[in-house]
Amino acid sequence: MIQRVVIIISLLALAACSGVSRSPQEQAISYALVNDVAVRKLTDQCTKVSVAAKQAALRGYRSWWKRNGNLVEAADYGLSYNLVTLTNDRLETGARYAMGLTFDIVAEAEQRVADLLSDGDKEDTCLDMMTEYRDGEMDLSEDTELFEILVKLQQSQEIQGADHLLKISRIERKKAKKYSRSAYVVERMVKREGCVNPKVRSLKADGPNEILEAVCSDKTFMLVRCEWRNCKIQN
């Protein structure tokens, strides 16, 4: 169990730092958001394995979020702040930046969860991993340097968060258009479900909570809800 935790933490840190052009802050943002998406997706998968795995998954996720949720929100704020600060009012450029980074984050998290559940007994893996999440062995504080950056982001969010949201609203009103961070992720998801040449548009894009519609080439459509980059097709 300990060896597995060390390997996963090391891989997550490596993934967060793999982009040569990324600043330390961008590395910290990626690190936090990859961890968040991974635990959400692992929770979703484990709830389908068995009753015991489901109970462990829900306990593990709730405990992890209680300790780390503020830092994840700070990372999301950092992503949004960079989007506006680096691109000013060029919302299209900022949207592409956010969508590209979100796509990378989700792809990394999906691969991590797939690797975890591909070998051995899924129930044992779920019970072991979600116990580690519950007990704090997968907390964001495991990487001291990135954790310190996230704490600073959290402090910045507390000071500047309201002004930042007003600036985003001003830009969106000026452009009369909302952009979804998860559009690339949704496009890939619906293609997996057989939707050919999907046209994805945002119906609601309020930070990490989004609703998107994908219209397929045969004129059928799929509605997708995303919460903190974890997207699900609605039946």
Image: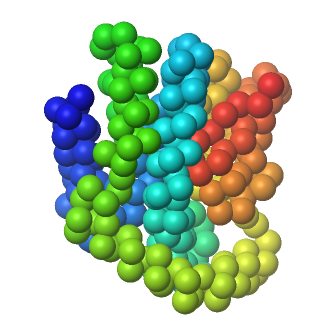
Q: Residue furthest top?
A: 121
Give residue 114's position: percent from left, percent from top. Answer: 39, 24
Give residue 87's position: percent from left, percent from top. Answer: 50, 78
The answer to which image quadrant residue 167 occupies is: bottom right
Above or below residue 222? Residue 50 is above
Front-most of 228 and 178?
228
Q: Is residue 69 left or right of residue 131?
A: right
Above or below residue 36? Residue 91 is below
Above or below residue 86? Residue 213 is above
One can see residue 140 in this view: yes
One can see residue 196 in this view: no
Give residue 13's position: percent from left, percent from top. Answer: 24, 52
Q: Residue at x 40, y 34 (%)?
A: 131
Q: Residue furthest front?
A: 135
Q: Residue at x 67, y 79 (%)?
A: 165
Give residue 188's position: percent from left, percent from top. Answer: 55, 33
Q: Residue at x 77, y 31 (%)?
A: 234
Applied colour scheme: rainbow
The answer to which image quadrant residue 206 occupies is: bottom right
Q: Residue at x 19, y 40 (%)?
A: 6
Front-most of 29 and 93?
29
Q: Looking at the figure, which quarter contains the N terminus?
A: top left
Q: Looking at the figure, which quarter contains the C terminus?
A: top right
Count of number-bearing discs:
0
Above or below residue 191? Residue 61 is below
